[in-house]
Amino acid sequence: MKSLFLPKKVAGSLITAGLVSGCTVAPFAVTDGLLDDAAWKQLSAHSLVQPQDYTSKGHILREEGSCRFLCANGNLYLSAEFDDSFLITSGEKDGDDLYHGDCCEIFIKPSGQPFYWEIWISPDGLRTVVKWSKKDNIESKGRLIEGREIRAAVTIKRTPAHGAENAGGWILNAAIPLPDVSGLEPGAWNILIARQNYDGSLSKETRELSSFPQLLKSSFHRTEEYFRLK
């Protein structure tokens, strides 16, 4: 594990044009896809929440997260913002198991198909893609989807209260290709945006799991509960 304190910008850039909201044409053009672009403010921000089996036991989410998303030109564009007072990562390179530290997880599943992709992106901009033919059965692992690259840019948030040595959270902007599978239309995708958030103890007992949409149980592989891009 490594504690992470980064300069403001990390890893990659986004090139976005002609974006659509959900899968409906947006009444604006986004020039760079970054969260501070005014166009993003016209989109709804969706809060990540703990699974119901956590909340039913009285767990309260300490550090919140939210996401906005667009899809166009065969890509899912994501802007996510996370409060995070202790940034810690586990990977050394793209393709590593990044979920042992702080990370955002994006799941994309083509409707009517048994397989789906899980993407891990860490606060240091590392990316890993896993293709599942079904839960617990990995078909492939790397950093590409069907030969196409996941693009990501990370900004570390800092506030005067956190000082120079500590972060206040992180902002992720990502462009994720939606592979052409069996001639599926753009709206035929089921999506989950999720987060693993560790504190300094690195314990799974104190790790926070949250997602949009909310899941019934604390497993991000409950594909029947993902939301549909429209």
Image (spheres, rainbow, N blue to C red):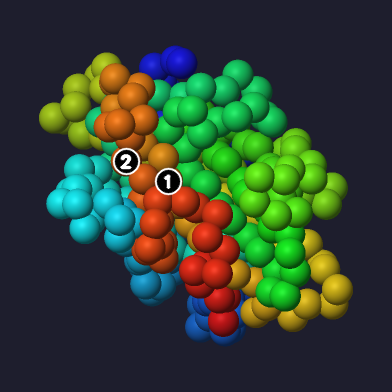
Q: Which residue is mark 2?
A: 208
Residue 179, placed above or below residue 124: below
Task: Please tell me which residue is depicted at 19% across the width and 27% down the height of the picture.
Answer: 162
Q: Nearer the viewer, residue 54 or 2?
A: 54
| Residue under numbered circle 1 | 195
Q: For the point 46% across and 16% down, which residue is it?
A: 1
Residue 71 x/y as whole percent: 61, 70
Q: Residue at x 27, y 51 (%)?
A: 54
Above or below: residue 193 compared with residue 97: below
Tell me the amino acid under the disc marked 1.
Arg
Give the structural element (helix, strand or loop) at label 2.
strand
Position of residue 21 measured from the top left corner of the image (x, y, whole percent): 52, 76
Residue 193: x percent and y percent? Answer: 48, 56
Does residue 217 show up? Answer: yes
**Is any part of residue 177 visible from this angle?**
no
Quarter of the image that includes the C terminus: bottom right
Could you tell whether 120 is left or right of 154 in the image?
Answer: right
Q: Is residue 205 left or right of residue 15?
A: left
Q: Nearer the viewer, residue 55 or 44?
A: 55
Q: CA distance from mark 1 to mark 2?
A: 8 Å
Q: Is residue 93 above or below residue 195?
A: above
In contact (CB < 8 Å): disc 1 and disc 2: yes
Residue type marked 2: Glu
